[in-house]
Amino acid sequence: MRFKRIATNNDERGSVHAPSPGVHAGRGDPRRHDPPDMNVRARGVFRATCVALCAISALVNAPFASAQLEVRKADLILINGRIWTGAAHPDEPEPTALAVIGDSIVEIGSDMDIRQRQGADTLVLDANGRRVIPGITDSHTHLISGGFQLVRLNLRDVHGRDEFLKAVGDSTKNKKKGEWLLGGRWSVESWKNPEAPRATWIDPVTGETPVFLSRMDGHEALVNSAALKLAGIDKSGPPDPAGGEIERDPSTHEPTGILKESAMDLVHNKIPEPSTKERSEALVRAMRYANSLGITSIHDMSQLADLEVFKKADAAGTLTLRITSYLSADDWSKHIGEVAKTHLGMDSKLLYLAGLKGFMDGSLGSRTAYMFEPFADAAPNSPYPRGQLTPFAASADSFQRQVIDADAKGLQLAVHAIGDQANHLLLDAYEAATKKNETKNPRHRVEHAQHLAVDDIPRFAKLGVVASMQPYHKADDGRYAEKALGSDRLKGSYAFRQLVDAGALVIFGSDWPVVTLNPFEGMDSAVNAKTLANEVWLPSHSLKTVEALRAYTVLPPRAIHREATLGILEVPKFADFVILKDDPLTISPDRLAKVRVAQTVIGGKVVFTAPE
Ligand SMILES: [Zn+2]
């Protein structure tokens, strides 16, 4: 049996020698080039040999051997589970138990073996025969804004104008004078009669309360007349800012209340900044919610103000998520030097600043994604029929220079690209930078990678660029993407299957609070190809359940160069794992979205237990 208890280094030393994830191997470090699960077979042979030698030594020198086999008691053991370790070539039979000392796994195997680790002070988690998986990573979040959204007006599930107005009116009632009504997440595409909302709709129910309600994707917002007035926007001006649009009535030139992309800032800048205390409370809400969904790690696209909140929580020992952060900035040149030198003080086991986040373009829903060809449904007089590049990407010279400089300093880059031309230009920039700097394996990321030119699909693997994708966007956008793009241009849209088959590292996340944080709803979209209108769409782009599960568990750590300490459940990695009430690997795929979490453990600490 493969799961004979094995003395690990930890046992031999009689002390835990936990991995040091705070210390990051440099890019040139060869360890980074070997996916750890490539070596599972080799380790199996090593283990078998070790077991055999121990057995011989036991015969030859019994007292010595018993000292060798004396195992250190665990702080926590998990028993009676069905452990999917996430390894590409899983051990047989499936392990049922694991032991944790400190924050790391010291042994994994059968209940009988692991029970020997049970001491008086050991916490025993009985999985009751349930499925256990590695901790889930959400590879693209806006955590603190998600924490705010949890307590703000959410119009996501509103399906028509009357419902919309009632929800907005009800939320305005308890506002104090001058207090803003915030939130949004509306999407008229899901309405029975899709019609673009207008300031004039909501003015009667909101009055003097200024309103800023972002569209579901955050790339446009509806504001009311009180908010327009505060921002000084009327029919005489101001002109559209670079990379944005103040939507106006073509005949009267009055602003409609819809602001796209950078034009949102004109109003957003008038909203009072939340205090540090409010941000900290939002973080706590967001972490609790994430833990309840089995999430143990996130890759966060963070605002500068978020970082202070993360650091405070880390210093206070209250983080219940591993946070790898990419600092969102319009002008990278201000940050490159400092981030490279100090990671802005974020380099602990739970908190790490990996690099910078930027934006190439907008979104499909707002028709601001930057495409090679005009949108199929572009209005005849639309000023931006192919969408828009952001100011960050619009000047090719400054964009390329920023990517080259950041790459040269060893930063990891995560750039939002939705439209096919935006993706193409970003791949070009990564290619140019890594060639010029002779960078080895930087694992730069394309966030979203939603609509790709077919010829660009193989470039991800070739250039070692990570495709950081959000499968639930496919379910969401699938309701109108064909209308926006035409049916001929979908071969490279949400191309999970094609990217995986071409050898790309594809990792999954949510983009919360843009869409649901629930990873099982994301898995459902990746596997079942259903849109939110319950139609099957682009099924040939789907992954198998096990592939989707890997994109949420064992693959994201590779994208952040942490595969030595996170991902596959094995010795001596961090003990981040989830006990599930339903087994995604054996249930019918159409039930994936309903998988529930029983317990979430991070670094050997239970951070969530579901009520039975
Ligand atoms: Zn995002």
Image (cartoon, grey):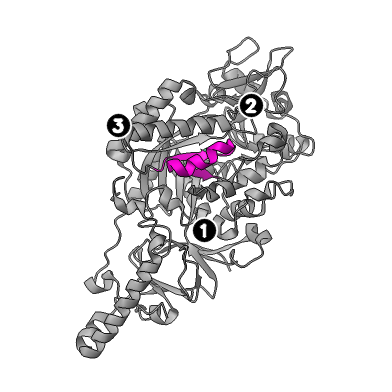
Q: Secondary structure at mark 3?
A: helix
Circle 2: element type: loop
Say what amino acid the circle numbered 2 marks: Glu
* Crowding at mark 1 (Cα within 10 Å: few <14, some 14-19, many 20+): many
User: What number is the disc on residue 294?
Assistant: 1
- Magenta residues span 443-469
> What amino acid type should be assigned to the residue bearing mark 3?
Gly
Q: Is residue 344 above or below residue 405?
A: below
Tell me which residue sits at (62%, 29%) in the image. Answer: 221
Q: Quadrant of residue 479?
A: top right
User: At which x and y percent is residue 498?
Assistant: 58, 47
Judge depth for marks 3 and 2 and give the one in front. Answer: 2
Q: Position of residue 57 (x, y in %)?
A: 23, 85
Q: Taking 14 as reference, is 504 above or below it? A: above
Residue type at mark 1: give it.
Gly
Which residue matches tag 2? 373
Spatial distance from mark 3 to mark 1, Cα to Cα? 36 Å
| Image side of residue 304 versus residue 529, left or right | left
Q: Is residue 454 magenta?
A: yes
Residue 357, picture quadrant: top left
The crowding category of the residue bearing disc 2, from other C-alpha atoms within 10 Å (few below 14, some 14 to 19, many at least 20), is some
Which of 553 and 486 lies nearest the eye of the viewer? 486
x, y percent for residue 58: 25, 87
Label 1, ligand 1: CB separation under 8 Å: no
Which of the marked residues, 3 or 2, is nearer the chain's N terminus? 3
The CA span between labels 1 and 2 is: 41 Å
- Tag 3 residue: 337
Please report the residue visible at 72 percent of the width from the left and 12 percent of the height from the top: 252
Residue 452 shown in magenta: yes
First-in-chain label (1 vs 2): 1
